[in-house]
């Protein structure tokens, strides 16, 4: 005999529960945490390097880097002055809450004020897997084109802050800031935007000061 | 998207609910997937056949209820389902919108036999 059983359970609920647990640990230790996501090559690592250079020594920083292979990005963060941990995901194209939980266990969280997580370069999957960070950040870059908010609505909708990197290249590529911003605004009207260039330094001040304020609030 | 880890989570959820209900078999699984949640039905079915083997969910049929994006315009209160790439309000061209539907990603129900 057949009967229907009501379930109504989120398919990624298990990951979300571990993410909440991670968030609680970070709150207890007073560590403000960012999850930085982007396409490969948008400038996540360069942004983190510059950010670490500008915030150390006034803040104690840790960086957790997720990549399919190599420790190249964690090495760059460490060279900039942060305590850096590399997660090699073994082929998984995004970080998940379990991986973060394991990385957090390697750190004495009481020793840090700010934790930056660099997610795997990927504009699709990471946004579906909450980690427990306080803010989700997307790094978009000018050469990627102005249609990305329309093509990747899940990612653009799922972030609290949007860094628009490589604005120094605007004179050299076809990019309508108006069209781009319109796509962002429709799906994410409250997102904070930071147009900047990691390379020239323009716009970095607003981003760094925002992070300083966020870390101070924890 | 992550069809393998999605499918593994799906198996865990359905087996847990089936076991709690004392089921000997799961015959149907009803999923609700919004348009903003990207997932490929055929990939899920493919992984399902592999990982549900030798469980009570083995022969379950997966049903995917797709929910289109539904928006409401905060300027003129018009509700609409956008067609194509344009998400702005078709009535007043407004871009201040709220997502009403389209972000669902859950298991609604299962049919079991005891």
Image (spheres, coloured by chain):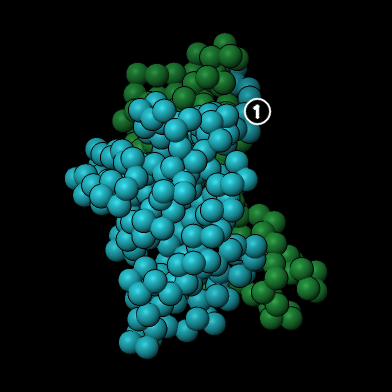
Residue B53 place in picture, x, y as percent:
34, 24
Q: With A76 as the anchor, is B65 left or right in this view?
A: right
- Pointer 1 indicates a residue of which chain? A
Colour cyan, chain: A
Colour green, chain: B
Whether A1 is drawn above or below A64: the answer is above
Q: What element carries label 1?
A: strand
Whether A87 is drawn above or below A51: the answer is above
- The structure residue drawn at horizontal position 80% and vertical position 74%, both measured from the top left corner, is B76
Q: In this orientation, does residue B63 appear? A: no
- The structure residue drawn at horizontal position 41% and vertical position 58%, both measured from the top left corner, is A54
* Quarter of the figure with the C terminus of chain A: top right
- The structure residue drawn at horizontal position 78% and vertical position 73%, both measured from the top left corner, is B75
- The structure residue drawn at horizontal position 47% and vertical position 25%, both measured from the top left corner, is B12
Instruction: Answer few, some or many: residues within 10 Å of disc 1's Cα (few below 14, many 20 plus, some between 14 and 19).
Output: few
* Quarter of the figure with the N terminus of chain A: top right
Residue B110 place in picture, x, y as percent:
57, 28
Whether B57 is drawn above or below A217: the answer is above
Q: Mark 1 points at which residue?
A: A6
Residue A172 place in picture, x, y as percent:
33, 87
């Amino acid at each position: 005999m057949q009967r229907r059983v009501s379930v109504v359970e989120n398919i990624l609920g298990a990951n979300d529960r571990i993410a909440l647990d991670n968030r609680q640990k970070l709150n207890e230790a007073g560590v403000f945490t960012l999850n930085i996501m982007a396409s490969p090559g948008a400038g996540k690592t360069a942004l983190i390097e510059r950010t670490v250079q500008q915030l150390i020594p006034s803040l104690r920083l840790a960086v957790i880097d997720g990549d399919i292979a190599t420790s190249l990005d964690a090495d760059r963060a460490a060279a900039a002055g942060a305590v850096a941990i590399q997660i090699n995901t073994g082929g998984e194209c995004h970080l998940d809450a379990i991986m973060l939980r394991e990385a957090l266990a390697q750190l004495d969280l009481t020793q840090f004020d700010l934790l930056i997580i660099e997610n795997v370069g990927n504009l699709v999957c990471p946004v579906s897997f909450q980690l427990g960070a306080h803010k989700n950040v997307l790094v978009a870059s000018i050469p990627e084109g102005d249609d990305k908010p329309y093509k990747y609505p899940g990612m653009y909708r799922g972030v609290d802050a949007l860094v628009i990197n490589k604005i120094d290249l605007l004179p050299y590529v076809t990019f309508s800031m108006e069209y781009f911003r319109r796509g962002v605004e429709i799906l994410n009207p409250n997102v904070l935007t930071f147009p900047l260039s990691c390379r020239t330094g323009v716009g970095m001040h607003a981003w760094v000061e925002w992070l300083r304020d966020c870390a101070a609030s924890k | 998207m992550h069809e393998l880890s999605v499918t593994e989570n799906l198996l865990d959820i359905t087996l847990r609910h089936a076991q709690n209900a004392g089921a000997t078999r799961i015959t149907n699984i009803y999923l609700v997937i919004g348009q903003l949640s990207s997932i490929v039905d055929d990939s899920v079915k493919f992984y399902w056949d592999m990982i549900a083997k030798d469980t009570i969910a083995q022969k379950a049929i997966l049903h995917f209820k797709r929910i289109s994006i539904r928006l409401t315009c905060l300027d003129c209160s018009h509700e609409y389902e956008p067609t194509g790439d344009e998400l702005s309000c078709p009535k007043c061209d407004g871009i201040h919108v709220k997502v009403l539907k389209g972000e669902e990603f859950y298991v609604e129900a299962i049919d079991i036999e005891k």
